[in-house]
Image (tube, rainbow, N blue to C red):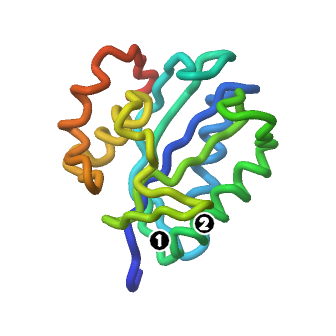
Amino acid sequence: MIDSSPAFIGLGANLGDPLATLAAARAELARLPRTVLRRFSPLYRSAPIDATGPDFINAVALVDTELSAPALLAELQRIEATFGRLRPYRNAPRTLDLDLLLYGDERIDTPQLTVPHPRLHRRAFVLRPLSDVAPDAVVPGLGRVDALLDGVADQPIERLSP
């Protein structure tokens, strides 16, 4: 790909059949225009944080994309909608959540998009799978992913797949 950017996408689900949903969402990411799915983390189970409902199943994907960050976000929201994502209130249980965690080394702060994701460094369910796909990735302004893991060591998380 010419002029592509690496992007990390967080995936999560806790309604319906989350395992099947994440498998299908992985396939959708692989079909994104002008984007190549490079790596996909193992799946993890964790309890909701600042939310209610069943445990979440989470993963992280690494893609190389020619899409701009806003265009990639629009594609992610389109995929969420096809899986019935509703947003009745903040941190509501969800059929599928796709978060743009990192987009190259860019820092973006608009009403529609904040990159790096503003809470990624406080969430084991993001950092653990992110470290599986890119342990030496750097979160702009915060440091290396593997070093950030120490800050979430007290959050329980269970690896489900190899």
Disc marking residue 32: 2
The alpha-carbon separation of the residues under discs 1 and 2 comes to: 9 Å
Among numbered discs 1 and 2, the one appearing first in the sequence = 2
Between 11 and 30, the one lying in front of the other is: 11
Direction from residue 104 to residue 118 in the image, left or right? right
Compared with residue 101, is residue 153 higher up or lower down, i.e. above or below?
above
Residue type, label 2:
Leu
Q: Quadrant of residue 75?
A: bottom right
Instruction: Give the residue at x 60% y 66%.
Output: 32
* The C terminus, quarter of image: top left
Circle 2: element type = loop
Circle 1: element type = strand
Disc marking residue 48: none
Q: Is residue 77 visible?
A: yes
Residue type, label 1:
Thr
Instruction: Give the residue at x 44% y 57%.
Output: 115
Compared with residue 146, is residue 114 higher up or lower down, i.e. above or below?
below
Characterize the local packing of mark 2: few (<14), some (14-19) or many (20 or more) Cα atoms within 10 angstroms: some
Residue 70 position within the rendered picture, expressed as x and y whole percent measured from the top left: 58, 69
Residue for badge 1: 65
Marks 1 & 2, CB-CB < 8 Å contact? yes
